[in-house]
Amino acid sequence: MLASPAFKVKLYVPLARPALALWRRLRGLFFINSYVKGRYLTHDRQRVASFNNDPLITRAIAVNILLDLYKTSERIVSDAAAITLPTQLLISGDDYVVHRQPQIDFYQRLRSPLKEMHLLPGFYHDTLGEENRAQAFEKCKALSAVYMLTSRKNLIISMKTAQDHQRIDGGSFLVDPYHYRRLIWRIALCERR
C-alpha cells in the first residue's frame, strides 16, 4: 500500500533541479530549506501543530538527497513492471508536495494482477493523517480482505508472471515463493486483533 508516494517532489522554482545539480558540482554539498509546512500536509489541526512543533523535523535538506530522490524515483516508476505483488495506491487529490502524474504512471506500469488506485479528493499529502483518514483506511481494509480471498492458484500465476518477466527482461529481483504465505499469515493475524 502506497499513500501519496513522492515519485516527483514539486519544486516551484523553474529549472530548480538542473540548477541544483549544477550548483552542487560547483559548490559541493549544501542544504536548501524546504517550503513544506504543516498546513500543506493535512487539514487535521493537531497533526499540523505536531509537525510544526516537532524538534526532529527540520526544514533543511541536503541537495544530494533531494537529487538522489529524483533519480531513484524515476527508476522505481520506470521499473514498476517488476512488481507483481498486490499493490494499492492512494493518491491525495490536493497534494501540494508531490506531482500526481508519476504516481499514475507507476500504477499503469504495475504487472500485479491485483492492483488498485484511489484518488481521494480534497486530501493533502499526509493521506493517512488527514481529518477524513477513515476513508483511506477503509480502502486499505478492503484490499486486505480481497487479498485474503485470493486463491493460491492466482498467487502461483502471479509468481510465474514475475519469473517470466525476470527471464525476458533479464532483471534481477527476488521472487520468494514463501513470501506470499508469510504475507497472508501476517494479514490474517492483523485481522484477528
Image: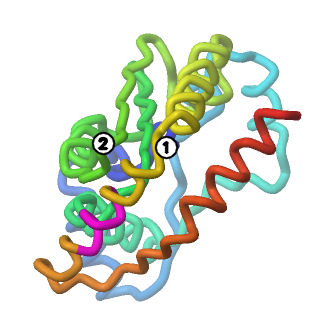
Point out the tag, 2 or 1, that comes first from the N-terminus.
Answer: 1
Q: Residues within 10 Å of mark 2 (few under 14, many from 20)?
A: many
Q: Position of residue 131 (x, y in %)?
A: 68, 13
Residue 25 within the magenta-colored segment of the rendering? no
Name the quarter where the C terminus is drawn.
top right
Nearest the viewer among 67 and 85 is 85
Q: Residues within 10 Å of mark 1 (few under 14, many from 20)?
A: some
**How far across and down, in percent of the image, does residue 49 sit?**
80, 27
Name the disc covering residue 103, or none.
2
**How many numbered marks, from 0 up?**
2
**Foreground of the two, 87 or 23:** 87
Give the prevailing secondary structure in the magenta stretch.
helix
Asked if the residues shown at circle 2 and circle 1 are in contact, with their CB atoms under 8 angstroms apart, the answer is yes
Vertically, is 165 above or below 133?
Answer: below
Q: Is residue 160 magenta?
A: yes
Is 149 situated above or below 58? above
**SS under mark 1:** strand
**Which quarter of the figure has residue 71?**
bottom left
Magenta region: 158-163
Give amino acid for label 2: Gln
The amino acid sitting under disc 1 is: Leu
Residue 95, position as x, y percentages in the image: 42, 28
Residue at point 42%, 75% (across, down)? 175
Q: What residue appears at the point 61 percent right and 60 percent down from the top-left corner?
A: 181
Residue corresponding to mark 1? 2
User: Can you say whether 66 is above or below 15 in the image?
Assistant: below
